[in-house]
Structures are given as structure tokens and as C-alpha cells.
Amino acid sequence: MSRRGDPLILSNADWTLIHKWRKAGIPLRIVLRGIADALDGHAHSWGRARKVGSLAYCAAEVDVARERWERALAGGGEPEADPASRLEELADAFAGSPLPQVAAFAVELRDPARAVLPRRQLEPWLMEREAALVALLCAQGGAEWTAAIEAAVDADLAAYRGRMPERVLQQVRAEAIARRVTATHGLPRLTLFAL
């Protein structure tokens, strides 16, 4: 976090807050806008000599940014913020897969009933579909291929063992494995967040 002037180690509460924002379907750019607004306000406050120690400091500004974004959507909004366009983008990426089971995900993503779902329902549905996709790709790749990916992720996370609660570490591990499995097949993550 360059705005702080030194690295920010995320606490369990910070990870929980990030997970809450993701499950709520708040786009990454909106979260970053709220964080930037909070840090801008801090830079001009009386307490600017003290560093911001947690993302919780930014939570109120992220909520304000989310509310502004939702009001903008209600009034016509930005076309790139439309979930239907993100679903279509994901469907295009999946339709090109040589694996028929993966290409079938494109059909689900193009279902018009999905595009009208509220973001709070759509993001959890995408997370479930991604878990099924990762399981499918791991089964397709075989036990050795999956073990190699898991070993690489475990090696990357070795430095964090003991410094992070086991539950949080396992969540980060699962996310890293999903990211590597999908990236290996040239597929994007199934999320409304444009990563």
C-alpha cells in the first residue's frame, strides 16, 4: 500500500472485510475508490502524522463509494458496471475452450435470467460455479498435475505459516490454487470483479 509509505500487513479482520466486500458484489474499482477517498481525507486531517493501521479505517468511505455507485446505476449508470456485460465477457472466454465441459459454462453465463439477478446473489453463484470449474479442471488434469499446483502454492505460502491463522491461510491457499488452475487453462476467474 504505497499511500501509507510502508507495507500493510492485513489482519484477520481486514481479510474478513475484503471477503465481505467481494461477497456483496462491490466492484474492485469502487472499493479502491473508497480506500483512496479515506486516505485522502486522512492526509488532510489533524491525525495525519499517524499511519492508517487497518482497512477498517476505510470501510465507511467504501460504503459511501458503493452508495454513490448504486445511485449512478439507478440513474442510468456506466455501461461497464453492468453485470450482463461482465457475464458476456466471461462467457466469451469460456466458449473458446477446447474442453466441452468448460464450454458448457458459457451457456450458463449467457442465461438471461442470470443477468437480472442482484449482485448480492450473482457473486455467490459465480463463486459456486468457479468451485465446480476448478474441481472439473483438477479432475481433468489428474492427481499429479493437481499435486504439482498445490505444492507450488504451498511453497509460495510457506513464509506465512505461523504468521497467519490457519483458517485464513487455508482460504488464501484455496484462492491461489483456483487462480493457478484457471490461469493454466487461459480462463478468467468467475467473478464480477474485473481482475
Image (tube, rainbow, N blue to C red):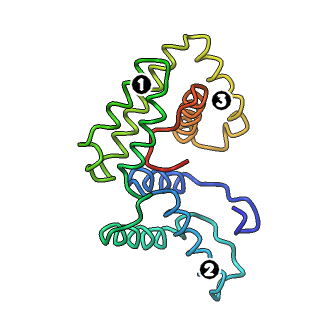
Given residues 2 and 83, the one toward you in this image is 83
Q: Residues within 10 Å of mark 2 (few under 14, many from 20)?
A: some
Where does the image place residue 30, in percent across and percent down from the top left? 49, 64
Given residues 153 and 29, the one toward you in this image is 29
Instruction: Specify the amino acid type for callout 2.
Output: His
Mark 2 or 1, nearer chain start: 2
Residue bearing the label numbered 3: 153
Q: Which residue lies at the image location 59% right of the left edge and 71% below the top edge?
A: 36
Mark 2 or 3, nearer chain start: 2
The answer to whether 88 is drawn above or below residue 143 in the figure is below
Where does the image place residue 95, in percent across and percent down from the top left? 44, 29
Residue bearing the label numbered 2: 42
Mark 1 or 3, nearer chain start: 1
Q: Which residue lies at the image location 56% right of the left edge and 63% below the top edge?
A: 32
Q: Which residue lies at the image location 65% right of the left edge and 29% below the top edge?
A: 153
Instruction: Specify the amino acid type for callout 3.
Output: Val
Instruction: Specify the amino acid type for callout 1.
Output: Ala
Can you tell which mark lies on residue 103? 1
Q: Single out the residue that lies furthest toward the left.
A: 113
